[in-house]
Amino acid sequence: MRVQDGVAYPEGPITLAEAVRVRLDGETALASGCDVIDLAGITQVDSSALSVLLAWRRDALNSNRQVVLRNPPANILSLIDLYGVGELIPS
């Protein structure tokens, strides 16, 4: 995951096969001071992606910080709506 100017940029899919790696990469970015995760580079998702996004939010909140998920693609927004977790995932 590329990190630049306090923004993390995950790229590629977030599916079951990649979820643990992407979650850990995001946690590392958050620990380094990122408060924004730009999701524009995400190409494919399944419900595992929601688990990753919620884990990032939980990690930020546990550190008394907020994380902003910027530029969520339509496929992520669709899952957020389908599962009714819009209030839990800030964007």
Image (cartoon, grey):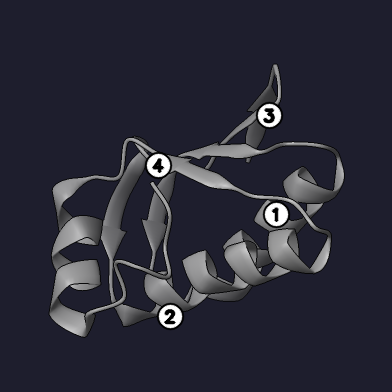
Amino acid bearing label 4: Leu
Residue 5 to residue 85: above or below? above
Amino acid bearing label 2: Leu
**Mark 4 sits on what residue?**
39
Residue 25 to residue 53: above or below? above
- Inter-mark Cα distance, 3 to 1: 10 Å
Does dot 2 land on a helix, a strand or a loop? loop
Q: Select label 4 or label 1 by which is in front.
A: 4
Does dot 4 land on a helix, a strand or a loop? loop
Badge 3 vs badge 2, beta-carbon distance below 8 Å: no
Amino acid bearing label 3: Val
Residue 25, which numbered label?
A: 1
Tell me what residue is drawn at x 31 percent, y 80 percent: 47
- Residue 87 position, x and y percent, is 35, 68
Does dot 3 land on a helix, a strand or a loop? strand
**Few, some or many residues within 10 Å of mark 3 (<14, 14–19, 20+):** some
Q: Select label 4 or label 2 by which is in front.
A: 4
- Residue 5 position, x and y percent, is 70, 16
